[in-house]
Image: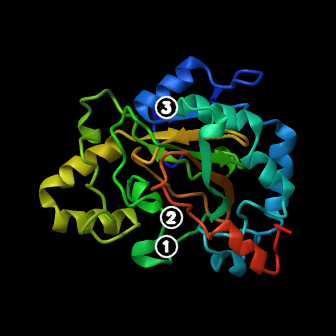
């Protein structure tokens, strides 16, 4: 798919049954390599119901309305009038998985993001430097916190992409760079070599970002090129969860034209990491809105 070599795809591994869904190997992969792609956290009925409810909220792919729909920042955020979105956000097995990754009790977790995003496959880019059809490789911590992440062995939060679509139908696999040990040059310290960090302008489109980076940091252009060479791709199915981190190199890739991909993005932080922000509009503001859910 999309010219990606077969050996660069990564399939999900199955979760365990019961209250502790992650295997020790999955926990170790997240803690050491920065990722774990897991199937079977949720039952299929919940995923199917959420996908159906969310699909009805967005325009059909290929329509003019779809072209005007923002991929980021939809109105489908927790708490929602879609009960399945709420159920998935606080699903006991998901909470248990996050707790095991962070080495915290569930009571020591705090939700800082839960929103459902559409992404449409398009034939051409339309948002200039901010276009997300083919993203530059990046880390997410500047979106979530003003502070640089702590040392790798002291993770502060778990980011998740819960896929509601099938990569075979829509394309757009998430690309990421697995960390290869403490001396991996891709994960040198501090993590600052990406557009949007410090004095570097935010440029989202891959081609424009790398051209900008080559101008601003020419000595590091080859280093960033090697990040792309090491990318692996999530071969996701509906219900799969990509657990990753604020300091994992990753990006979005092009989708098939006139398709819709739905994902729910969720972040939990450690309760003591109060510098990690709530990503979307404060939930208390729901009380002022016509679609209030906190009565």
**Residue in front for this viewpoint, 77 or 51:** 77
Residue that badge 1 annotates: 125
Q: Picture quarter containing residue 141?
A: bottom left
Precedes in sequence: disc 3 or disc 1:
3
Report the front residue among 154 and 196: 154
The residue that appears at 66% across and 53% down in the rendered structure is: 263
Q: Is residue 14 above or below residue 136?
A: above
Q: Position of residue 16 (x, y in %)?
A: 71, 21
- Mark 1 and mark 2 residues within 8 Å of each other at the beta carbon: yes
* Element at label 3: helix
Decide: is 271 above or below 79.
above
| Residue at figure coordinates x 53%, y 19% from the top left | 25
Residue 133: image tag: 2
Disc 3 and disc 1 in contact, CB within 8 angstroms: no
Instruction: Say which of marks 3 and 1 sits in front.
Output: 3
Q: Which secondary structure, mark 2?
A: loop
Mark 3–mark 2 Cα distance, whole angstroms, equals: 26 Å
Question: Label 3: which residue?
Answer: 30
């Amino acid at each position: 798919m999309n010219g990606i070599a077969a050996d660069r795809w990564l399939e999900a591994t199955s979760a365990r049954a019961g209250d502790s869904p992650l295997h020790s190997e999955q926990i170790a992969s997240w803690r050491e390599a920065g990722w774990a792609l897991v199937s079977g956290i949720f039952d299929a009925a919940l995923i199917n119901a959420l996908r159906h409810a969310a699909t009805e909220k967005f325009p059909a792919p290929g329509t003019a309305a779809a072209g005007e729909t923002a991929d980021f920042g939809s109105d489908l955020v927790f708490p929602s009038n879609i009960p399945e979105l709420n159920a998935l956000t606080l699903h006991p097995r998901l909470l248990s998985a996050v707790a095991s990754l962070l080495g915290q009790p569930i009571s020591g977790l705090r939700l800082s993001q839960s929103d459902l995003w559409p992404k449409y496959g398009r034939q051409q880019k339309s948002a200039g430097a901010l276009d997300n059809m083919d993203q530059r490789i990046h880390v997410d911590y500047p979106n979530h916190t003003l502070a640089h992440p702590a040392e790798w062995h002291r993770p502060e939060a778990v980011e998740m992409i819960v896929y509601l679509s099938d990569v075979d139908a829509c394309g757009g696999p998430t690309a990421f760079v697995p960390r290869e040990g403490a001396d991996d040059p891709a994960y040198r310290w501090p993590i600052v070599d990406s557009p949007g960090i410090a004095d570097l302008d935010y440029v989202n489109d891959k081609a424009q970002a790398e051209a900008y980076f080559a101008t601003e940091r020419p000595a590091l252009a080859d280093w960033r090129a090697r990040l792309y060479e090491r990318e692996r791709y999530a071969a996701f199915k509906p219900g799969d969860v990509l657990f990753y981190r604020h300091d994992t190199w990753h990006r979005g890739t092009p989708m098939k034209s006139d398709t819709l991909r739905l994902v729910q993005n969720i972040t939990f932080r450690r309760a003591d990491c109060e510098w990690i922000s709530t990503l979307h509009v404060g939930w208390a503001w729901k009380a002022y809105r016509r679609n209030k859910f906190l009565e």
